[in-house]
Amino acid sequence: MDIHRTFAEVVFWEEGRLRHHGRVDMTRSGLEGFGRSLRKDDEIVVEATGNAMSVVRVLSPFVARVVVANPMQVKAIAHARIKTDKIDAGVLAQLQASGFLPEVWVPDDRTERLRRLVARRNQVVRHRTRVKNEVHAILQAHLVPKCPHADLFNKRGRDWLSRQTVPDYERAAIARHMREIDRLADDLAELDGDIAKDTVDDADVQRLLTIAGVNAVVAAGIVAAIGDVSRFHEPQKLVSYFGLNPRVRQSGLGIAQYGRISKHGRSHARGLLVEAAWAASKAPGPLRAFFLRIRNRRGHQVAAVATARKLAVLIWHLLTKKQDYLWLRPSLVAAKRRQLELKAGAPSEKGKGRRGAAYAYNLKALRTREREGSEQAEKAYEHMMRHWRPQGARTKRRTDATSEERQ
């Protein structure tokens, strides 16, 4: 099926031949009527589009399987100069019959809901950033100096902004932008609450919160992108899924040339990993030591991407082995989990004389002791890497030593 917004072009593959069926209306009643005309052992192939998941849900009860194809890979495999809906549907049928169809994993309903919530939150954040940039652009256009406060859009920043001299029409524009920012903040809080309700009891999200630099938003986004971690048989598969693997070009006897990361796969999840990498670079621990080691040789940006890749490998091991991060800080993890519970609607215990596990993060002595433990882990990693040699280098050194002994 080559699906569009209002119709789908259908082609059957029967006994090695293509048969054109015609068009089907892209409505629930139209798809259900088409589904009743199929056999239970039939398979349906569609490309991944905005309404593909709805087609999967409607047609799955009528057939053996509904397969979702990767449109980019299908285009690379079956590029044609003549392109029609009938030809596109026939290409999907032929690729599935021959076993060469690049298939996309179909998430369950819960994962699909979480993905939609995370995607909507990302859209709100990006829109709010654009509106804030417009306010900064207005101030820059009228030579207003930089705000002395950390945030232009909190109470102190807005008080400072109200005292700046700008034309009346620009002040009206700033007022409209501020109202839009406040509205988006309310939408963001509502989405955070919905995401927290879906993930507060999720064991994978709770496990990822034990990693330094990973908060509830990052953990929920990563879990939504991964879905079932068992479909990734090794950590490199997950790294490639996030597009953090380097591009490689090699031909004949030439040396393989490694370039920048591929950036294929889920871009939003890759951005979350890079965001977590920057946060991890400021917290004591082995991840910070790894970031600093790469930064000293390649710079900040490369170090952040390399740390994001290291996080992807770490996440695969934690989710696959169902273990918490070894160098976690218990009070900090308890505080992050408590924040997630409050966003999910849990009642506040403030003023009731009760102290939960998250209260330990308020004790400076305990925080200092946990931080010292993380700093010791960071130093241990630095010591290990200082004396580490690649396997090939150790083998070559032993071979050279043996040759000298024989001489």
Image (cartoon, rainbow, N blue to C red):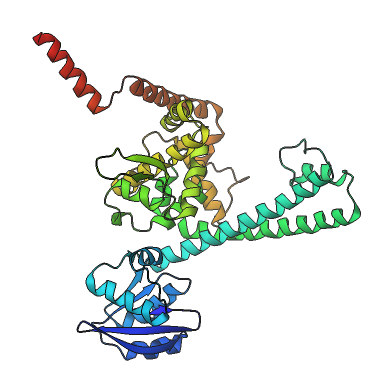
x, y (%) of residue 323? 33, 43
User: On the picture, is 291 further left or further right than 91?
Assistant: right
Q: Position of residue 217 (x, y in %)?
A: 52, 51
Taking the image as shown, residue 177 lies to the left or right of residue 264, namely: right
* Residue 275 higher or lower than 401, as above or below: below
147 and 93: which is toward the camera: 93
Residue 162 % position (x, y): 86, 47
Decide if residue 243 is in sight here.
yes
Q: Place residue 174 in its image quadrant.
A: bottom right
- Choose top left, top right, bottom left or bottom right for residue 94: bottom left
Left or right of 205, for residue 140 = right
Disc tally is 0
Quadrant for the C terminus, please. Answer: top left
Quarter of the image with the N terminus in it: bottom left
From the viewer's side, name the closer residue of 356 and 218.
Answer: 218
Question: Which of these two is toward me, 219 or 41?
Answer: 41
Residue at 41% x, 22% y is 379
Q: Residue at x 13, y 14 (%)?
A: 402
Q: In which quarter of the image is residue 187?
A: bottom right
Left of 148 or right of it: where is 9? left
Compared with residue 360, is residue 15 higher up or lower down, i.e. above or below? below
> Observer-nearest residue: 356 or 370?
370
Q: Is residue 332 visible from the viewing direction of this image?
A: no
The spot of residue 230 in percent (x, y) is 29, 55
Which residue appears at 27% of the width and 73% of the height? 96
